[in-house]
Image: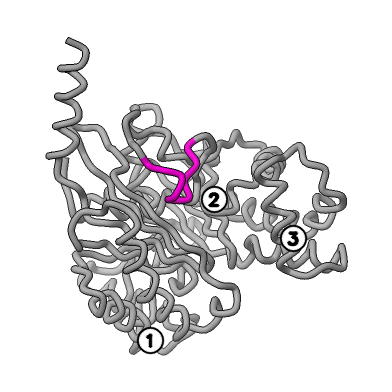
Amino acid sequence: MLGFVQNIFALRKIFAPAHPMGVDFGTDCLRIAQVQQIRRDFNLHAAASADVPPDIRADPGSHLAFFTRTVSQLLERAPFRGRQVVLGLPASIVHIQNLKLPATHEKDLKNAVIQEASRSLPFYAAHALVRHWIVGNTREAARETSGHQVIVMAADARWVNKYLEAARSIRLNVVGMNVQPLALLDCFARVYRRTCEIESTRFYIDVGSSGTRAIIARGTQLLFARNLPIGGDHLTRSVAESLGIGFHDARMMRIKLGACPQALVSGVDAAQERPLEELTRQLDLCRRDHLSTFPQYPIERLIFVGGEARQRAICKRISKRLGIPGQTGDSIRRMMWNSKIGIESAIDRRHPQPAWAAAIGLSIGPAVTSE
């Protein structure tokens, strides 16, 4: 009887449709994840990843050449289904602003957003792909005026078009694109489905190599987003300078410390203190800015994601300094118990996998599938 039940579950898994592949193309790593849905539960059907060589991270042309060369290899390595993909725009090319605008008629708001945002864009406004969200209303008692609190995300259309061309050149069927903050919310809102989790206010701290994304939300309701210029590379560089060693050696020391917090790596903690203190200060400013707009939604929990979230000691220090409980955002652990992903995917299920949240969210995303 038990064997019969197991066979039924195996057949459901085989014939259950797979979502499009989620492609998370970060500064230091390319990750592809494909989620399968069985009734209301999710199964990680396939996953693969490859590290971006350090010498090409700052060169956009080489970065895209790496993408086209490597994606084909990764698709052959794992049992992905089909060629449909949802591309994630790299966080490093997405410009985020929080704006306070005067109350404006809906048909005029988009123009007002573009005009205001263009003042600080790192590229010409004519080349910008802009998306905005009204997340709240503001009111200045002294002037008796009201307005909108708006989050704006913009990317350079020229780079986005090259990204699309690179994907199509290797016969990928691009069915959608998304930004990393929304992909993270899609992931956790659909994997963490208990009412107390959906209705809580969470501060997602996405610590990558080139920077940190600060995202505050209730479920999929985005309340605040900001890019912070401090990431894992800044911590690594601080260790290298303090200990008088090369960047690669310092990175290996930090990886070792993240994998085994009890490891005795002399001087690393002290060397990271200055950039970590500045990062914590900026995160606290984000918290204060959020509370100035949404005092009714105090932050209840920190969720650490991104590759640097594997540094558990750093996450604990940030959580302690902000005075808010924190946890590692491990979406894979909440998926179906029968997800069978081998170690060749670079996913070791014995440990939390916070770096995979965006890729999984891109695949799950409600923009391309429904329950």
Viewer-nearest residue: 223 or 171: 171
Foreground: disc 3 or disc 1: 3
- Residue under circle 3? 275
In the picture, measured across the screen, residue 284 lies left or right of residue 245, that is left
The span picked out in magenta is 341-349
Task: Mark 1: give few (<14), some (14-19) or many (20+) Cα within 10 Å.
Answer: some
Viewer-nearest residue: 101 or 344: 344
In the picture, measured across the screen, residue 222 lies left or right of residue 246, that is left
- Residue 117 in the image: state x and y as whole percent: 42, 77
Foreground: disc 2 or disc 1: 2
The residue depicted at 70 percent of the width and 38 percent of the height is 320
Disc number placed over residue 94 in the picture, else none: none
How far, Cα to Cα, is label 2 from label 1? 28 Å
Q: Can residue 88 be seen in this view?
A: yes
- Residue under circle 2? 205
Residue type at numbered disc 3: Pro
